[in-house]
Amino acid sequence: MPAIGQSIKIDNVSKFYGSFQALDSVSLEADAGEFLTILGSSGSGKTTLLKIIAGFEAANDGQILINGADIAGKKSYERNIGMLFQNYALFPHMTVAENIAYPLKLRKIDKDEIAERVNFIIKLIKLDGMEKRLPKQLSGGQQQRCALARAIVYNPPLLLLDEPLGALDKNLRHEMQFEIKRIQKELGITTISVTHDQEEALTMSDKICIMSHGVIQQCSSPEEIYNEPRNQFVAEFIGSTNLIKGTVMTKYKENGCRVSMVKTGLTDEPVRIEEPLDRRQFNLDDVLLALRPELIHLMKNRSGHINSFKASILNSVYMGDYYKVLIRVQDGSELNVKISPEAYRQYAGEKELEFFFNADCVTTIYEKEKGVMLKTIE
């Protein structure tokens, strides 16, 4: 029962509740077989968008195209979209096999084909031998597998996941991240998931769309979202980052890169920043430098480095495989860094240490770049 995922395109979708605008001209795309996650905090508009795709809510404007066909005018049951809810919504009086077969019976599928599809999907989700169990006889993870099987057994063109792992404990949540991804890839089903969990989004997604106040702030691969945030909101929302204010002193091209010498409060000397020539650029002097804690390194041999600076240690927390350390730099601002346990123990007695970062590890966020977005997010 190989599924064939279909492409989906959300084109300028807006939604109002009275005078409140929940979605502001939202546009995004997912290719056939792609796993796209809509990531945002409460009130960002992600669940509203999911309901509009599913047909539970009507958009005030815009199109929803599946394989090029606009489904915005169709009722939810006409869209044939699979959906997995956070609470699973299994029928308590039905067995695993009966729950999975239910959508096939609604579609009046032949009994032999129902048996074949149910058997295939039960093996796929690894619930062999549990066909006759009731939902109450299953663990949380098994209930979720059963609900997922029911959502995909009729081979829908699109699967929607609404906070799919929110009801599971941490260890089971990690396990199910890989299981859902495995099943999704094996079937090739196009999937859109909404979550507020950053780790879940980074782990499971081919593409992540970050939403805030009803606006898509950035939509790209997990690697690009993390390493090249488009604006200040994205930089602060995903993971932990340090935002360092700076002023561009000089700019020039060198070895296929745009090099900027930026004056910051880290040190009296300007720091060197290297960016690909094809990255968006604005002729502005005031910038923010986004620098991840794991990209700031201790100077081990105390030799000079163009991007080196001294800092005092304010606090540290042991995290198992690293120490999270809070440092204060020359202008009094504070940065977070990650230091390995070995290095931390070696320098634990010192109140001031020297750090450095590489020129190509910094993302430059130009202050006025916020205005590029559909709505300014402060």
Image (tube, rainbow, N blue to C red):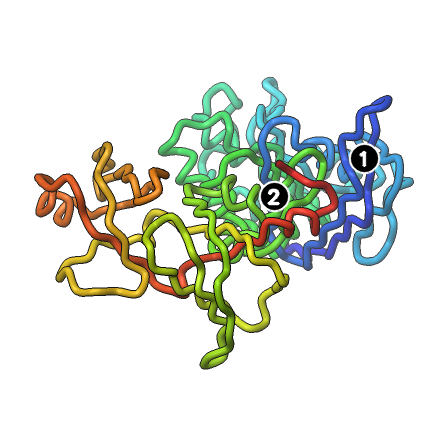
Q: Residue 315, relative to residue 272: is it above or below? A: above
Q: Residue 211, relative to residue 230: is it above or below? A: above
Q: Which quadrant does the C terminus fall into? A: top right
Quick one: SS at disc 1? Answer: loop
The image shows residue 352 at horizontal and vertical percentages of 17, 43
- Decide if residue 247 is on the left or right side of residue 49: left
**Residue nearest the observer in this picture, 226 or 365:** 365
Whether residue 65 appears in this view of the structure is yes
Q: Residue 66, relative to residue 351: is it above or below? A: below
Packing grade of label 1 (10 A; few <14, some 14-19, many >=20) is many
Disc 2 target residue: 210
Residue at 12 percent of width and 48 percent of height: 342
Spatial CA span between label 2 and label 1 = 22 Å
- Decide if residue 74 is on the left or right side of residue 224: right
Residues tagged 2 and 1 counted as in contact (Cβ below 8 A)? no
Residue extending furthest right?
Answer: 73
**Residue nearest the observer in this picture, 368 or 372:** 368
Residue at 85 percent of width and 35 percent of height: 59
Disc 1 target residue: 55
The image shows residue 230 at horizontal and vertical percentages of 58, 52
